[in-house]
Amino acid sequence: MMTTQFEKTISQLTQPLNNPYPRPWMTRLANPMEADVFIVGKNQRNGYECSVLGSHSRHMDALFNRNSESCRQMYDEITGGKASPTRKNTDRSTQILKSDGVNRILETNVICYSTPMSADLRLSGHLGGSKRGEEIFRYLLEAIKPKVMMVHGAGSRNKLASILDADLGREPQSVEDVQISEVSGFLIAVIPSLAPPAFNKWSPWFEEHLKLVSAEIARYLTQ
């Protein structure tokens, strides 16, 4: 199969950096360029260590869900099958979207680079990784051009606002406080963080709120 320019660029951008391979997305799509919707966080916690993952070609196969590899299989291998709380909440968000017929989803981050805590991105040893991680996200926006982005958490929203040079509004404060707007050619849905401890503050109304957001996204995609 001919390698596309998109794959060539992703291969270059995901070369090892500070040991781990940068992880640009989680998806079940064989062709990530078909994604209509991005679920956008700040940055991921679990690094894909080269010594554990193996070759870069295996990493690429997993990213494109081919040759008996997959994004989720790789994640489960790295984490020993123990999904993080944020991963579980993201999985549930994806399930809610799919229940409304929204299936072409790519989960990513405004900084596609792993650190134990988002605050660690400011440490000198991670500045190169943070720069590469943002470069990856900017490329995904340019290459894929998703119709919708659902961004969760204040840090993610603020960084995405900076990248788009636009005001993305505020976080919702209640179940029916749906914050959706068209910005820079994208439909942007802002939701509170899916990562504890911030998630704990809105967990009682998380599912009902996501159902309202999902319905609006599905409506927009079928217009």
Image (cartoon, helix red, strand yellow):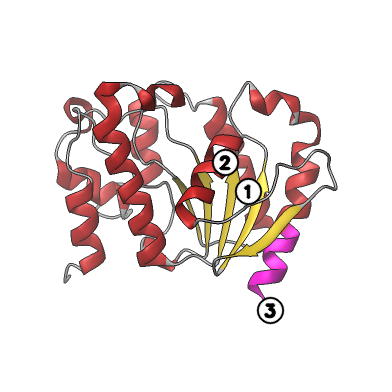
Label 3–label 2 contact, CB within 8 A: no
As shown in the figure, which amino acid type bears the numbered disc 1? Gln
The quadrant of the picture occupied by the N terminus is bottom left
Q: Which residue was labeled with disc 2?
A: 91
What span is colored magenta in the figure? 215-223
As shown in the figure, which amino acid type bears the numbered disc 2? Asp
Counting other residues with Cα less than 10 Å from the Cα at mark 1, is it few (<14), some (14-19), or many (20 or more)? Answer: some
Magenta segment, principal secondary structure?
Answer: helix
Q: Residue at x 31, y 55 (%)?
A: 64
Q: Residue at x 38, y 51 (%)?
A: 137
In the rendering, at what x and y percent does residue 175 appear? 83, 42
In the rendering, at what x and y percent does residue 119 appear? 44, 23
* Location of residue 221 by image quarter: bottom right
In the rendering, at what x and y percent does residue 214 appear? 70, 56
Numbered label attached to residue 95: 1
Q: Which residue was labeled with disc 3?
A: 223
Q: Distance between the Cα atoms at labels 3 and 2?
A: 26 Å
- For marks 3 and 1 on the same chain, the one whose residue lies earlier in the sequence: 1
Label 1–label 2 contact, CB within 8 A: yes
Q: Distance between the Cα atoms at labels 3 and 1?
A: 22 Å
Left or right of 74 in this view: 96: right
Counting other residues with Cα less than 10 Å from the Cα at mark 3, is it few (<14), some (14-19), or many (20 or more)? Answer: few
